[in-house]
Image (cartoon, rainbow, N blue to C red):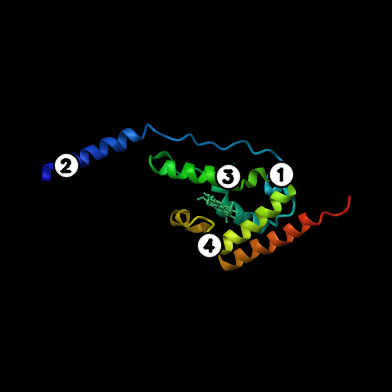
């Protein structure tokens, strides 16, 4: 019986070691000046700090990859979150959205944050500093509402 456990452990280690060669490719696409949400000129600095801290890792091209991002299988979960996150909302490519898309995404940002869905709870386990206080959620929603209104009623040009 003991022998079996030892064999199982060795097999586990071998599989773990071999799996290290199977890695997703991580990348940070280039950030083009003028495109990031902070370049729109309407995001107050204190809000920008919150978004950078709590959302950038999955919703921007400025992801910080921690040491465990190099370890299989953690890296696959991360790659999936980042791919998905960016495809729904990429704050580094904000300028590429149409006005309508921006208005919709602003609404979703407030909804997701208020509901506690974002930042992803699994992310908060390892990034406690990313958790949002009620005041921070309120700040986000006040801005998304104001910015949504501004974009829905562009000044006559
Ligand atoms: C650990 C990664 C991660 C972090 C951090 C994170 N998100 Fe997300 N976010 C995702 C993923 C993954 C999805 C796609 C969810 C899905 O497919 O159901 C998503 C989706 C969204 C969506 C789109 C919802 C929709 O219906 O299309 C919004 C808006 C959003 N996140 C806002 C935020 C905001 C704001 C923050 C920071 C306060 C944040 N997220 C932090 C991973 C993350």
Residue under label 1: 95
**Crowding at mark 1 (Cα within 10 Å: few <14, some 14-19, many 20+):** some
| Mark-to-mark CA distance, 4 and 1 | 26 Å
Give residue 146's quadrant in the image. bottom right
Lower sequence index among marks 4 and 1:
1
Residue occupying image coordinates x 31% and y 35%: 17
Please report contact status of discs 1 and 3: CB closer than 8 Å, yes or no.
no
Task: Name which residue lies at 70% across and 62% down.
Answer: 145
Image: 20 above or below 122: above
SS for callout 1: helix
Q: Mark 4 or mark 2: which comes first in sequence? A: 2
Can you tell which of label 2 and label 3 is closer to the viewer? 3
Tell me if label 4 and label 1 are in contact, CB under 8 Å: no
Residue wearing tag 3: 86
Q: Earlier in the sequence, mark 3 or mark 4?
A: 3
* Coordinates of residue 155 in the picture (x, y in percent): 85, 54
Q: CA distance from mark 4 to mark 2?
A: 43 Å
User: For this rendering, which residue is in front, 33 or 78?
Assistant: 78
Q: How far apart are labels 1 and 3 at the CA level? A: 14 Å
Going from N to C along the chain, the mark reached first, 1 or 3, is 3
Does mark 3's beta carbon lie closer than 8 Å to ligand 1?
no
In the structure shown, which secondary structural element does the residue marked by tag 4 occupy? Answer: loop
Image point (89%, 50%), residue name: 157
| Residue on which the image places disc 4 | 116
């Amino acid at each position: 019986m003991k022998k079996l456990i030892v064999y199982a452990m060795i097999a586990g280690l071998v599989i773990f070691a071999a799996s290290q060669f199977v890695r997703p490719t991580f990348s940070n696409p280039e950030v083009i000046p003028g495109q990031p949400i902070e370049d729109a000129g309407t995001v107050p600095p204190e809000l920008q700090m919150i978004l950078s801290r709590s959302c950038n890792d999955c919703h921007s091209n400025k992801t910080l990859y921690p040491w465990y991002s190099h370890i299989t299988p953690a890296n696959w979960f991360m790659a999936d979150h980042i791919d998905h996150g960016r495809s729904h909302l990429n704050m580094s490519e904000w300028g590429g959205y149409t006005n309508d898309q921006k208005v919709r995404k602003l609404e979703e940002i407030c909804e997701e944050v208020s509901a506690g869905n974002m930042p992803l709870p699994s992310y908060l386990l390892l990034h406690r500093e990313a958790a949002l206080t009620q005041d921070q959620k309120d700040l986000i929603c006040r801005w998304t509402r104001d910015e949504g209104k501004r974009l829905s009623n562009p000044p006559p040009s």
